[in-house]
Amino acid sequence: MLKIFDSHAHYDDESFNEDREQVIKELKENGIVGVLNCGASFEGARTSVALADKYDIFYAAVGIHPENALEFNQNVLEELRDMAKNKRVRAIGEIGLDYYYEENPPREVQKSVFRAQMKLAEELNLPVVIHDRDAHEDTLNILKEFPKVKGVLHCFSGSVEFARECLKLGYNIGFTGVVTFKNAKKLVEVAKEVPLDRMLVETDCPYMAPTPFRGKRNRSDYINYIIEKIAKIKAVSEEEISKATINNTKLMLKL
């Protein structure tokens, strides 16, 4: 059985409300050695910490997702700083920019909230979990403003050139189930380019389920299919991908 560290999940999502306890029990039985549960909203950050306190394989990232940037204020910042004192909180995230939906907060608001949380990560010496959707250039420019901060570009969706720039800055690249999709040619090229010691694997569950579960609720043990695909792309064994991605996640989270 392959060992897996899911570097990005949302088990606080309501789609797990009916059977969360059972799913987490099964994950432990199915080789999952760690899960980083990432807050996307203020409430999500709180729940992520609660999950990490309750389950020994869970760790938490706390932050405000760009879609929720309007809920960010000084009080929220102080509470995130306070949450980060918990030993189970290992990162600030997920934070970043999302220009995909027109109804998202204005770009200037998103950038301001992103910078404030990058500053917090720098101050606390914590890694960041970056969300970047259709905002590659602005994301890269803000990452460059904080050279001391490192972390992961989660659910990577950029070009090989963009991946190279992120690697130069010391970031890891997170691969989801998208890499298993038939139309994922660009991501396959990225996977060829990214060295083994800079790759992370993730579900972004309940979203992004790999083939053959595409469209269904995702969960950490489905990462087997991501590892299988990356092993083929890199022409190495699945065990090698498993070991490398666990090691990379632990290094990033200072575990």
Image (cartoon, grey):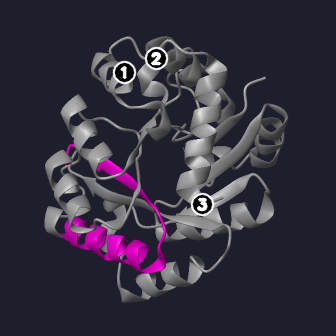
Please state which of residues 196 and 127 is positioned toward the viewer in this rendering: 196
Q: Which mark is residue 254?
A: 3
Tell me the kind of residue under disc 1. Lys
The picture places residue 250, in percent across and down from the top left corner, at 62, 51
Residue 31 drawn above or below residue 10: above
Q: Which residue is mark 2?
A: 234
What is the CA distance from the residue labelled 1 to the residue labelled 3?
Answer: 26 Å
Q: Which mark is residue 192?
A: 1
The picture places residue 44, in percent across and down from the top left corner, at 54, 63
What is the CA distance from the residue labelled 1 to the residue labelled 2?
Answer: 6 Å
Q: Which residues are magenta?
A: 109-135
First reached walking from the N terminus: tag 1 or tag 3: 1
The picture places residue 103, in percent across and down from the top left corner, at 22, 54
First reached walking from the N terminus: tag 2 or tag 3: 2
Q: Can residue 223 be spotted in the picture? A: no
Tell me the kind of residue under disc 3. Lys
Q: Residues within 10 Å of mark 3 (few under 14, many from 20)?
A: few
The residue under the point 70% across, 55% down is: 58
What is the CA distance from the residue labelled 2 to the residue labelled 3?
Answer: 26 Å
From the viewer's perspective, is 24 left or right of 107? Answer: right
